[in-house]
Amino acid sequence: GESVGLHLPTLSVQEGDNSIINCAYSNSASDYFIWYKQESGKGPQFIIDIRSNMDKRQGQRVTVLLNKTVKHLSLQIAATQPGDSAVYFCAEASGSRLTFGEGTQLTVNP
Amino acid sequence: DGGITQSPKYLFRKEGQNVTLSCEQNLNHDAMYWYRQDPGQGLRLIYYSQIVNDFQKGDIAEGYSVSREKKESFPLTVTSAQKNPTAFYLCATGMNTGELFFGEGSRLTVL
């Protein structure tokens, strides 16, 4: 069936470095993509989203890139901080259903 | 405060018992969702409801039941038919535009 997956289960970076978290999706009909951040024991929090008619969107310290040709999504975090340590999920939307990937654990080392 | 309230935060169940997890929202969102999360894994959709008195099965609905009698409430019952119910359960709401807002979760443990 359709699925959203992530290339790496863990990512470790130094404080101040830029982080890049990748995601591959398989449903070409998905028209909306979201990145969520989940801290331990809590519910996911919205970070940034992008529609399929765009290839880049920027927020505060975060950028999402969408490459529809290869069905690839990435989240870039600039100047990564210890508070960014969490699990990051990409999700794809088709209609009102959201399908989540397995997540990447980001660890920021001081 | 506006938001999504899940209760209880922690719940213990004996095998063979049904338990009900509560999810209440005051965001006036039409759609509500229940997801299950196992350790180190992503979220899997159990049930969702786009409108009052209507709901649809998600990917792992077996052993679960829901109701949507009010817009604000979407309780999830974990029945004895669910063979491996120990998990973290997340309720979410949305406006059918894609973005979901999540509650803080309920952790169910079967003793």
Image (cartoon, grey):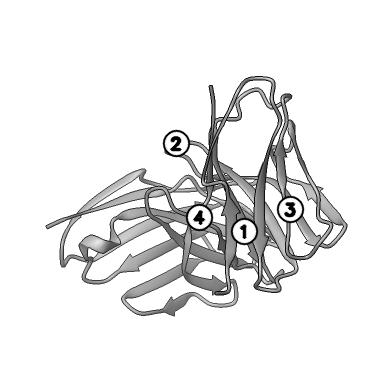
**Residue that badge 4 annotates:** B104
Relative to residue A34, is residue A22 depicted above or below?
Answer: above
Q: What is the count of numbered marks? A: 4
Q: As shown in the figure, which amino acid type bears the numbered disc 3?
A: Tyr
Where does the image place residue A11, in percent across and percent down from the top left? 27, 49
Q: Secondary structure at mark 4?
A: loop
Please name the residue that numbered disc 2 is placed on: B39
Q: Quadrant of residue A68?
A: bottom right
Percent coordinates x, y for residue B87 in the rendering: 53, 35
> How busy is the neighbourhood of tag 4: few (under 14 within 10 Å), some, or many (20 plus)?
many
Circle 3 is placed at which residue position?
B48
Question: Crowdedness of circle 1 by 10 Å Cα count: few (<14), some, many (20+)?
Answer: many
Q: Of label 2 and label 3, which has the lower sequence position?
A: 2
| N-term-proximal mark, 1 vs 2 | 2
For disc 3, the chain is B
Binning the other alpha carbons within 10 Å of mark 2 as few (below 14), some (14 to 19) or many (20 upward) gives few
Disc 2 element: loop
Query: Which residue is denoted by mark 1 in the rendering?
Result: B92
Q: Residue at x 59, y 54 (%)?
A: B6
Crowdedness near tag 3: few (<14), some (14–19) or many (≥20) residues, C-alpha within 10 Å: many
